[in-house]
Image: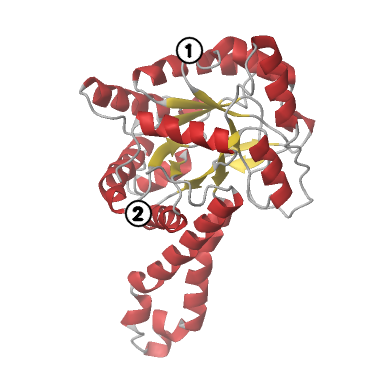
Amino acid sequence: MPIASPEIYNEMLDRAKAGKFAYPAINVTSTQTLHAALRGFAEAESDGIVQISTGGAEFLGGQYKKDMVTGAVGLAELAHVVAGKYPVNIALHTDHCPKDKLDGYVRPLLKISQERVAKGQNPLFQSHMWDGSAETLADNLDIAQELLAEAVKAKIILEVEITPTGGEEDGVTHEINDKLYTTVDDALRTAEALGLGDKGRYLLAASFGNVHGVYKPGNVVLRPELLRDLQDGVGAKYGKQDPFFFVFHGGSGSTEQEIRTALENGVVKMNLDTDTQYAFTRPIADHMFRNYDGVLKVDGEVGNKKTYDPRSWGKLAETGMAERVTKACADLRSTGTKLK
C-alpha cells in the first residue's frame, strides 16, 4: 500500500482510539531501519507510524554536509516509493523538534507539503511534532497555534508536547522530577488555545512521568491513570467525552499494565526508539564477535569478504529490529488491525 493519505491517517487514529489500541511509532535513521520497521508492521498485519527525529534527519543528510531537511525529505521520498510493497498503511512523522530547530526542520517541511497539496498531491509527511516542553506553557501554545494553522494548510496533523518528558532526546534534556506530570489546568489551557479539533487536528503528548532512554521497570514512576483525569477534566468543561488523542513518549521499559492503562485512557501512538536501536544493533554485535577473524584482517590475513559484506550483518539487523516492532504491535494491541 502507498504511504497513508490524510484521510487514511485520520481513519487510523480514529480506529485506534475507538478500539483502545495504539500504533507503535518507530524512529528510523537509515534505509535499513526503514525497511525493518515496514517489515515488522507487515508481519504483524498492523498499520503503523515511521518517524524521523531532528538528530536522525541530520544523520540521514550525510556527514559531509549535515542537513536535517535533506535527510528527512530523502528518506520520506524513499518511503513513498518502497511502502507500496508492504501490505499495510504507514504514516510518516517527524519526532521532537524544539524551538531553536523549527526554522531548520518543521517549518520548511510544512512548506514542502503545502506545495504538494496545492498541486493536488498528498503531503510528504502526515504529521509533525512541535516540542515546546522547554518553553513556558504560554509560549509553547502560542507557537503551537501558529504551527497548527500551517499544518491545516498541508493536511497534516500536529503533535504537541505541553509538559516535559524526562531524560534526553537529541540534545533536549529534562530532569526527572514532579514537573513530569501534566495537570488538568495544563490540559484546559491547551484546549482553550488549540481547540478540540475545530482549529485543526492535533495529538497531545501529555506527561505522566515519562522518561526517554534506557531505564529498568520501577526506576521511573509512571502514572498513566493521570490521563483519565485530563480526559475527564477537559471533557466535562466542553461536553465532549475523551477529547484527547494522546501520545506515549519514553515507552521503552514500560510494564504491560502501564501500557494497558495508557491505552484505556486514550493513547493512540507510542514512540519506540531505544528498544528498536538495541534490537537492530544486537545481531550485528553477535555477528562481529562470532566472525572476528573474518570481518578484520587479523595478523596480515585477508579476512572473509562474506562476513564483512554489510549485507551479511545488515540482514540480521533488519530481522532483529522487525521482530521488536512486531512485539510492540502485540503490546499495543494493534496486531491484525490493518485497514483493508
Q: Secondary structure at mark 2?
A: helix
Label 2: how many Cα within 10 Å (few below 14, some 14–19, many 20+): some
The answer to whether residue 250 is above or below residue 135 is: below
Q: Secondary structure at mark 1?
A: loop
Q: Is residue 13 left or right of residue 214?
A: left
Rounded to the nearest angstrom, the CA distance separating label 2 from label 1 is 35 Å
Of callouts 2 and 1, which one flags the residue occurring earlier in the amino acid sequence? Answer: 2
User: Which quadrant of the figure has residue 210?
Assistant: top right
Q: Which residue is mark 2?
A: 31
In front of the other: label 2 or label 1? 1
User: Which quadrant of the figure has residue 226?
Assistant: top right
Residue type beneath disc 1: Lys
Q: Position of residue 16 (x, y in %)?
A: 53, 37
Whether residues under marks 2 and 1 lie with C-beta atoms below 8 angstroms apart, the answer is no
Instruction: Judge by depth and name the residue closer to the eye, 263 or 101.
Output: 263
Residue 239 is marked as: none
Q: Which residue is at a point 35% across and 84% down the rendered structure image?
A: 304
Q: Which residue is at a point 49% across and 65% down the rendered structure image?
A: 320
Look at the image and tell me whether residue 296 can be seen: no
Instruction: Judge by depth and name the residue closer to the eye, 175 or 73.
Output: 73
Residue type beneath disc 2: Thr
Q: Which residue is mark 1?
A: 199
Label 1: how many Cα within 10 Å (few below 14, some 14–19, many 20+): few
The answer to whether residue 292 is above or below residue 7 is: below
Q: Quadrant of the C terminus?
A: top left
The answer to whether residue 90 is above or below residue 40 is: above
